Image: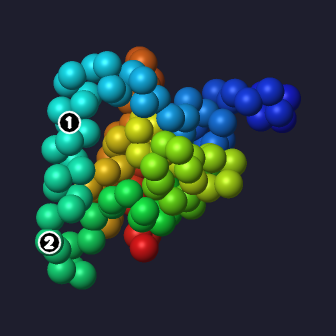
Amino acid sequence: MLARVLGHCDSSQCFNHRIFQCQQYRVLHDPLVLAELFQRLERAELPRSNMSLRVRVGSSVVIRQTHCDNTPAILRFTLVEPSSANPTQGKVSYLSPMGLALLSVPLGAVFTVTVRASESHWCLIALN
């Protein structure tokens, strides 16, 4: 509880965890991450049918953590522009590690979020 009050948390189930925090400066200064971001944004904006929904900026998502020892976390939030991000209100920046991993992911897909040397695995279970 104290970690949540102080603004940091080691649990990937907590919106104060670094996977939900905007990292626009790191993204904008790393050419490889920036190139991947552009590819994902282009893919997310391609014309699509209702049969092939993909996450894009403005999407509301429900994700479930997989491959965890305890009860898997289920989180709901909206992917937003960095200026609108507020993880505690369910608004996660597309430039956060979670946002970058989610861009252009299709409904039902399992994806990996990597921050430094740690990985967490998630499944996209709902998309609006």
| Picture quarter with the N terminus | top right
Label whose residue precedes the other's in the sequence (1 or 2): 1
Q: Residues within 10 Å of mark 2 (few under 14, many from 20)?
A: few
Looking at the rendered structure, which numbered label has been put on residue 47? Answer: 2
Q: Is residue 122 above or below residue 10?
A: below
Q: Nearer the viewer, residue 83 or 85?
A: 83
* Quarter of the image where one finds residue 30: top left
Indicate the position of residue 46 as horizontal and vertical percent values.
15, 64
Q: Is residue 99 above or below residue 123?
A: above
Amino acid at dot 1: Glu
Drawn side of residue 35 relative to residue 101, left or right: left
Q: Is residue 116 above or below residue 17?
A: above
Amino acid at dot 2: Pro
Q: Is residue 23 above or below residue 124?
A: above
Q: Residues within 10 Å of mark 1 (few under 14, many from 20)?
A: few
Q: Nearer the viewer, residue 4 or 40?
A: 40
Residue receiving disc 1: 36
Q: Residue at the spot x=16%, y=74% of the render?
A: 48
| Picture quarter with the C terminus | bottom left
